[in-house]
Image (spheres, rainbow, N blue to C red):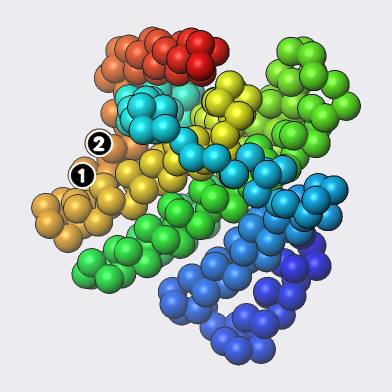
Amino acid sequence: MAGLSLLAMGFWWVVWDYSQTTESLKWLQFMQTVGTFLLPPVLCAWMWDSAHRPFNRLHLNKRADGVSILIAVGIMVVAIPSINLMADLNSRVVLPDCLASLELWFQQQEATAEALTERFLQADDIGELLINLGLMALLPALAEELTFRGTLQQTLAESGQTAKRSAAAIWITAIVFSAIHMQFYGFVPRMLMGAMFGYVFVWSGNLWIPVIMHFTNNALAVLFYYLTDNLLQTANDSKNIADTLGAGDTWWLGVTSIVITSLGLLIFYRRTRTR
């Protein structure tokens, strides 16, 4: 991961000469994602599988049925207010005075990530929207699930098949998954999403399901920004609504979302157990 990531950055530096244009940074994002999260798990799976069948080891060798996909997508849609509620609670965390410098760094990281994301989300036509969906929704969904659920979680759970070990693997992977994004004020909701993806993967035995859920979450953000920015011309107000629905005065929507999301996961679990 480190070697391919450095190779991607070196190639970008040579070709784009450390340019800070949006196009250049998007290319860097593409190469870093492929080098850091997409190729390493595929290469590891190829080496670790005795028959050199990486798709089998990564549980990508079977199709996800339509009903499971619909349930998974529905879960992610109704989970949006609960994600916002968790993010709002996470943002209220105040570190002790002795960690003031660390807290300032967290805030700077958050602001930098938010500014870069907004630059990437800008799209003036359908072509740019499709590029954003590929770069910010499809590619990270596939690459990150291959790395975290497909490789790390499976590796942690491999030495035993007990429910306790499986749960530990899910939660350790979810913590690493959230921490690697380097965004403290979104740590809790991202960790919980990672755990949800992990459980869905274990229940279904199919990595395509968490990939689809991950893609749905990212794609909704990309699509919502595009629609409000280009069609409704109310990006700022609508963005605030999208990010706060379920938090603040609408906390009850967040709580309701938690209940419905939990029921959706229960339905998914029972369906996979009876098949």
Picture layout, residue 267 above or below residue 15? above
* Amino acid type shown at disc 2: Ile
Horizontal and vertical percent for residue 28?
57, 72
Horizontal and vertical percent for residue 69?
39, 33
Relative side of 86 to 247, left or right: right
Relative side of 259 to 204, left or right: left
Residue 167 location, quadrant: top right
Residue occupying the point 54% across, 13% down: 273
Q: Please state, as top left, top right, bottom left or bottom right, where the N terminus lies in the image.
A: bottom right
* Amino acid type shown at disc 1: Asp
The residue lying toward the viewer, choosing from 224 and 50, is 50
Q: Is residue 102 visible?
A: no
Picture layout, residue 177 above or below residue 52? above
The residue lying toward the viewer, choosing from 168 and 62, is 62
Q: Residue furthest left?
A: 232
Q: Residue beneath label 1, please? A: 237
Residue occupying the point 55% across, 40% down: 62
Disc 1 on helix, strand or loop? Answer: helix
Q: Do the residues bearing badges 2 and 1 touch, measured as CB atoms within 8 Å?
A: yes
Residue occupying the point 38% across, 62% down: 132
Q: Residue beneath label 2, please? A: 241
Residue density around tag 1, few if under 14, some if 14–19, many if 20 or more, within 10 Å: few
